[in-house]
Amino acid sequence: MIQSILSNIALLLIMHLCIQRLYFEKLKKDLSNSFTRFFHILLTSLAIIAMFYVPIFIGEYRFDLRTIPITYVALLHGPPFAIPILAITSIWRFMMGGPGALPGIVFGLALPTLLALIHYSLQKHNITNLKFFFLYSLFWIISDLPIIFLVPNGLEAFKDIAVPRFLSFQIGAYILHYFVQSSRHQHQLVEQLKTYADRDPLTGLYNMRKFAEIISELRSKTPLYIAMLDLDFFKKINDTYGHRCGDKVLKEVAEILQNADPKKIVAGRYGGEEFILSIASSNKNDAMEIVEAIRHQMEEHHFYSLDGQLINTITISAGIAPLKEHWGIEAAIELADYYLYIAKETGRNRVVADL
């Protein structure tokens, strides 16, 4: 019995390791959500089907831990994952046949999954250890209580298997829960580290390393212009309202840039109060219109200090240069920065693309 219980737990862990690997590959290679969901469903279904062939023998009765993975998926991911898994595994078990097929589907798969989905629909995703214990105790009762009514001497049979079944349920569920939660925490840490490596910590825009990496990929697909933007008289804001207010202004400027035209614009922070954009455009006039729209939006935007005081109008100056086919990005930045210098020298609050 112990060996067969360990075999079922081993299947749970193999399933978890495969799914964990899948999600880390998604993080590394940006796999699509539909691809990830498909293989998550497939891996969980295969683990449950494998359990059908590795039963736990308690006396003359055969059981397995099929209820644990499907209910756990239902608790975490809801119907889009749980329903396909339920359909695949139920059809497979029905095709295997035998007198226990229908009770195994109804009480071992369908009813516990339905209860888990009801819990999910109530948006109670934060499952404490105590709640987890009660949930899997309930899943165990749903799975095993029908024995009393479905087999000869059912009450005696239920008493004989209750303790080992209950313990195997709780131990299997807790082992899976522990490793899944550890993996989710690790996954979150990796995502945070990736964000810190690619993003400016204040504004959330791309840092220059990541910006240059993105541009090197984009330039082979579409013509690009580089725009350098600088906040006019930003030092005065820091001197008047303090650096914390200056940081608040930079964050709001970053939001404006991120929302300007996401299909055409990639935004980064160049440093200080300077920002850099790549604009997917085949002609200078179109690029200028996009940056002019940003300049106008910035001029119309109401910025407030930390104590709610309206700050005087904040404007930007900008320079735009093409990223020519034979140029490195540094050459385009240098030219755009020169045009930015001209914009600031000729009155500020303007966009310059050539002389």
Image (spheres, helix red, strand yellow):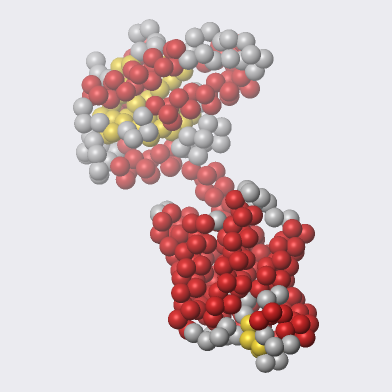
- Judged left or right of residue 25, residue 350 is left
Q: Is residue 138 visible?
A: yes
The C terminus - image quarter: top left
> Residue shown at 52%/62% (left/top)?
82
Quarter location, residue 296: top left
| Depth check, front residue: 252 or 229 | 252
User: How many numbered discs?
Assistant: 0
Q: Relative to 121, is 345 above or below?
A: above
Q: Relative to 70, is 337 above or below?
A: above
Residue 61: give x, y in percent of width and height.
Answer: 66, 88
> Residue shown at 53%/8% (left/top)?
312
- Judged left or right of residue 346, residue 154 is right
Residue lying at the far bottom of the rendered structure: 60
Residue 278: give x, y in percent of width and height.
Answer: 34, 32
Q: Is residue 323 visible?
A: no
- Judged left or right of residue 286, residue 117 is right
